[in-house]
Image: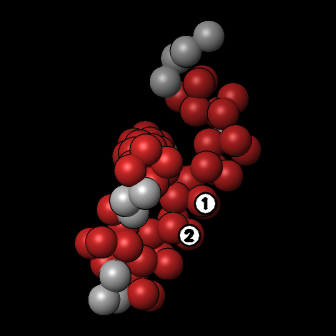
Amino acid sequence: MRTLDVIVAVLLVVGGLNWGLVGLFDFDLVATLFGSMPAVQNAVYVLVGLSAVYQIIGLKGIQSRWHVS
């Protein structure tokens, strides 16, 4: 599960940075990178959203796996 935790964390950082860019500069990095591939663009957005849900649901389990009190 630690691998999944790291993947989820990376996706959340990517999503957070993308939203920061959208808010500050009206620049959507995901749309810029994958604009010609709307299915990939939507998949990235869905994966970021699912990562957030995973973090919310599994926060206690993640803390115990990483030995954080």
Q: Residue furthest right?
A: 57
**What residue did someone put label 1 on?**
50
Q: Position of residue 29 (x, y in %)?
A: 33, 62
Q: Is residue 18 left or right of residue 61?
A: left
The answer to whether the residues at label 1 and label 2 have Cβ atoms under 8 Å apart is yes
Q: How is the image coloured?
A: secondary structure
The location of residue 68, given as percent across then percent down, is 55, 15
15 and 6: which is toward the camera: 15
Q: Residue furthest top?
A: 69
**Identity of the amino acid at label 2?**
Val
From this view, report whether residue 64 is shown above or below residue 24. Answer: above
Instruction: Looking at the picture, tell me which residue is in the foreground, 47 or 4.
Output: 47
* CA neighbours of label 2 inside 10 A, class few (<14), some (14 to 19), many (20+): few
Check disc 1 and report its element: helix, strand or loop: helix
Q: Would you place residue 36 above or below residue 53 in this image?
A: below
List x then y, in percent, for residue 10.
38, 46
Residue at horizontal 30%, vertical 72%? 32
Q: Residue at x 37, y 59 (%)?
A: 27
Please state if 56 lies on the left or on the right of 47 as rendered: right
Tag 1: residue type? Leu
- Identify the image quadrant of residue 20: top left
Q: Residue at x 42, y 87 (%)?
A: 38
* Spot occupied by residue 25 in the image (x, y as percentages of width and height): 38, 50
Vertical placement of residue 64 versus 48, above or below: above
Q: Which mark is residue 46?
A: 2
Residue farthest along the front direction in this orientation:
25
The quadrant the C terminus occupies is top right
